[in-house]
Image (cartoon, rainbow, N blue to C red):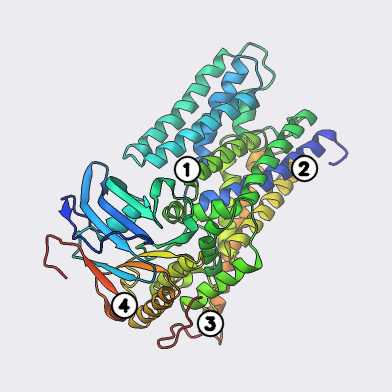
């Protein structure tokens, strides 16, 4: 497999996407915005179609469309208007429909079809693509890890973050833009319809086993890299589409972890030590050390 | 949280003095165009523990949230440490405990991670957590009676313990002005005593405390002044 240049490039792209998508996904899951990546994928399609129709770089036009979409989502959320839900639906389906219509204006003989963006075309990754992907991944990881503490604080309790003087709107916009970049980065690997899978499923797996937010982030990234690399390899040998194979691997990991967790709980309930001993007394009614 | 949309006149508390931690002059607070409170005059000096009381819907939470800018300031002005709020930048000096019973989100979060997030306002954007910050978090956990709970998941704590974790988060920033919204609501007597003792200790260090409470309970021993908001129902 590694003797083929296109597979080496595909695996490198899979590592980049496997690492970045879950680190964004963890923050989205914490904020209960799991499906936002899916919606932005719809908007990205319009960008791709415009790129194909105007013979400009579809990755660039998709990036512009997705970033604009992400900013609109965040501004609508910040305004907390009652019609936000419907407004988002209009934007997402408008993007999808626009993409389907605009792409018919693409000149005849366009080498890459919409299908390769919808379902992924990992093996068409070129060296030039990989350089762009690496740059995008560096930006995403720089934000999700470098500003992790601030993003975590906002994701945990937006109101408290505002009362602490944090630039909440700015941080939310930044996460939205990073989500948009991740969607664009992932569309060639996974396809626009499956992007959310690699953002959210590893975070969902981490939710089952992690014992802290930090470990959730690490576990999600590890699972992301594992399923995207192994999914790419399986797709090579089994001759299956890469995007679908990767997401199915993530679903399988989730299923295995869920069963393992249930079995673990079951063994706790039937085992001899049912009641865990608290580390310290739960409530200390009388003397409590005072803060400095 | 029940909020009336009918404007009410709040009583005038102590006059604004130089060196106050919090000053509200002619404050009007509400949501959108709906005024909940008008004509609020309040001054809280360092070392004071001021209880804000009143019946449901009298605007107690709106007062605290309005002071912090979480709902609209429709009239008057708010000053923190004699600096108008619009120009105030030292937000690490102000702590806030929201009226909330849980902070559990979609991902597991430890008590230490939650409490550490309260320290963030003391750090610059890219600054890493130092030894002093870790110590502050340890002290905050001890202060809220949660020593030894730092590795536990927030979602696994009881309601009272989660409320105390929110208190610890505010303490982690070493606030000089602490605003608490019903910190003892739905909390057992033992936890209420922990909160009261913690607030007394904070006030002894010279911090100003504003606490919204429906029932004073053990807080009666530490409150130095009570401000009562008039409401439609019978006064508390």
Please tell me the numbered disc located at residue A270.
3
Q: Chain of mark 3?
A: A
Compare marks 3 and 2 and give the one earlier in the sequence.
2
Please tell me the numbered disc located at residue A237.
2
Which label lies toward us, 2 or 1? 1
Image point (80%, 31%), residue name: A127
Please tell me the numbered disc located at residue B219.
4
Compare marks 2 and 1 and give the one earlier in the sequence.
1
Q: Chain of mark 2?
A: A
Which label lies toward us, 3 or 4? 4
**Helix, strand or loop under label 4:** helix
Percent across and percent down for residue A148 are 60, 52
Give the CA distance from mark 4 to mark 2.
69 Å
Percent across and percent down for residue A290 are 47, 80
Please tell me the numbered disc located at residue A169.
1
Q: Are marks 2 and 1 in contact (CB under 8 Å)?
A: no
């Amino acid at each position: 497999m590694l003797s083929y240049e296109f597979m080496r490039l595909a695996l490198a792209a899979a590592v980049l996407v496997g690492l970045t998508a879950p680190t964004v996904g963890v923050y989205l899951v914490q904020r209960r915005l799991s499906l936002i990546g899916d919606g932005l994928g719809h908007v990205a399609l319009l960008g791709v179609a415009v790129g194909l129709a105007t013979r400009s770089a579809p990755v660039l036009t998709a990036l512009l469309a997705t970033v604009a979409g992400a900013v609109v989502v965040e501004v609508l959320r910040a305004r907390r208007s009652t019609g936000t839900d419907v407004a988002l639906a209009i934007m997402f389906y408008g993007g999808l429909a626009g993409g389907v219509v605009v792409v018919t204006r693409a000149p005849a003989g366009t080498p890459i079809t919409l299908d390769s963006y919808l379902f992924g075309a990992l093996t068409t990754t070129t060296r030039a693509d990989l350089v762009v992907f690496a740059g995008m991944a560096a930006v995403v990881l720089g934000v999700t890890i470098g500003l992790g503490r601030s993003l975590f604080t906002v994701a945990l309790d937006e109101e408290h973050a505002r009362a602490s003087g944090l630039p909440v709107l700015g941080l939310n916009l930044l996460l939205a833009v990073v989500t948009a970049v991740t969607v664009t980065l992932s569309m060639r690997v996974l396809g626009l319809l499956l992007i959310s899978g690699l953002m959210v499923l590893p975070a969902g797996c981490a939710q089952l086993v992690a014992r802290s937010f930090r470990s959730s982030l690490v576990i999600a990234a590890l699972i992301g890299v594992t399923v995207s690399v192994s999914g790419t390899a399986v797709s090579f040998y089994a001759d299956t589409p890469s995007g679908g194979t990767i997401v199915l691997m993530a679903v399988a990991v989730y299923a295995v972890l869920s069963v393992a967790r249930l079995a673990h709980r079951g063994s706790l309930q039937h085992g001899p030590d049912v009641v865990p001993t608290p580390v310290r007394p739960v409530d200390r009614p009388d003397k409590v050390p005072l803060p400095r | 949280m029940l909020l009336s949309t009918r404007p009410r006149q709040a009583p005038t508390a102590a006059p604004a003095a130089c060196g106050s931690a919090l000053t509200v002059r002619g404050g009007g607070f509400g949501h959108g165009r709906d005024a909940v409170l008008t004509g609020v005059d309040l001054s809280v000096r360092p070392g004071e523990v001021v209880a804000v009381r009143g019946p449901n819907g009298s605007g107690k939470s709106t007062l605290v949230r309005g002071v912090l800018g979480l709902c609209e300031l429709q009239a008057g002005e708010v000053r923190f440490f004699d600096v108008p709020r619009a120009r105030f930048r030292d937000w690490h000096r102000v702590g806030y405990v929201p009226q909330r019973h849980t902070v559990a989100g979609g991902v597991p979060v430890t008590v230490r991670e939650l409490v550490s997030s309260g320290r963030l306002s003391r750090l610059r954007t890219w600054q890493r957590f130092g030894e002093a910050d870790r110590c502050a978090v340890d002290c905050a956990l001890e202060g809220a009676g949660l020593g030894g709970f730092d590795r536990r998941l927030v979602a696994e704590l009881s309601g009272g313990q989660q409320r105390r974790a929110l208190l610890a988060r505010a303490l982690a920033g070493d606030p000089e002005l602490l605003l608490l919204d019903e910190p003892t609501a739905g909390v057992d007597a033992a936890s209420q005593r922990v909160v009261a003792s913690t607030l007394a200790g904070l006030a002894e260090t010279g911090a100003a405390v504003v606490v919204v409470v429906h029932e004073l309970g053990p807080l009666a021993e530490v409150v130095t002044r009570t401000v009562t908001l008039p409401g439609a129902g019978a006064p508390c």
